[in-house]
Image (cartoon, helix red, strand yellow):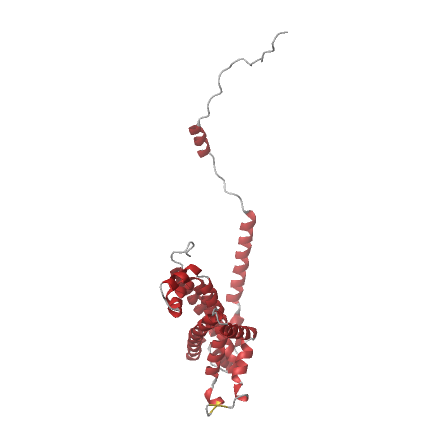
Amino acid sequence: MSAQTDILPPAGPAPPLKDDAADADAVDGLRIVPARRTGQWAAAVAVLVLLALALNSVIRNDAFQWDVVGDYFLTTAVLRGLWLTLWLTALVMVLGFALGTLLAVLRLSANRVLQAVGWGYVWLFRSTPILVQLLFWFNIGALYPEILGVRTVNLLGPVTVAVIGLTLHEAAYAAEVVRGGILSVERGQLEAAQSLGLGPWRRLRRIVLPQAMRSIVPPAGNMLIGTLKGTSIVSIIAVQDLLYSVQLVYHRTYQVIPLLLVATLWYVVVTSVLSIGQHYVERHYARGSADPR
């Protein structure tokens, strides 16, 4: 019986080796065509057309009375109301964050009583509408006709009531902003500061708050802008802010729309300036982070 042998194909010429350089040249010679986004461009054109039509209707509509807007935009009454709005916003933010920082420390305290006091304050003032709070403080004389021998009506005027009401309201939200920023600091930073013998207040001032500012600044900037616009509610208690000032004018002239546009434009201008400032402050505190913007 003969042994079986494998039949091998006849040896032929070896296949040519691929030339990587030639392939690279061929790839470089290909034309790269970007993906077509017809739907996005069509949507963009439609939005631009709608914006142009809206802008044209606003500019050409005589009912807006742009000439009246220009006449009252820089009047003394409007500028005085604008100044009160800016002053009230700045004061409320400073006092609100001072009280809010104290409340945040209370909420983070190891003492259960202090925790409960901080939590109860935040819960109460975040649960009540700001308008209700202002009206309550405005009518506080019904509960306490005299404070320290002075009639409450003489002690708490409309501006004082506005400062108290807005500050107590903002402090509740500022407390949560500051508390969130403090909690964002790594625990190891606190342990390292404690090992160096730093006291609680010094640790908070020198170690915790500088690092927490990265998380505090963005929501604080939003609160500042919100407070600026929220001050318009004090017009309900006859505080002559920007909105109340234009209301006094249009109650006399009956030019409601152009005077409301005056207030709107001033709010837009101030808000835009604050937004630009917020951007640069955020960039300052974001130095060294993975995604500085």
Q: Is residue 205 left or right of residue 137?
A: left
Which quarter of the picture shows residue 196? Answer: bottom left
Relative depth, front residue between 282 and 255: 282
Q: Measured from the top left, where is residue 99 in percent x and y? A: 45, 74
Q: Nearer the viewer, residue 52 or 9?
A: 9
Residue 163 shows in the view: yes
> Given the current orientation, which residue lies at the most extreme bottom position?
149
Against 228, residue 10 (above or below) is: above
Residue 41 against residue 112 in the figure, above or below = above
The residue furthest right is 1
Q: Where is residue 34 in the image (x, y as percent from the top left)?
A: 50, 42
Q: Position of residue 203 (x, y in %)?
A: 39, 66
Q: Which residue is drawn at 44% across and 29% down?
A: 20
* Residue 2 lies in quadrant: top right
Kindly identify the residue that appears in the image at 56 percent across and 79 percent down: 132
Q: Nearer the viewer, residue 67 or 78?
A: 78
* The N terminus sits in image quarter: top right
Q: Quadrant of the C terminus?
A: bottom left
The residue furthest top is 1
- Residue 105 x, y percent position in the rendering: 45, 70
Q: Residue 258: in sight, yes or no? A: no
Tag count: 0
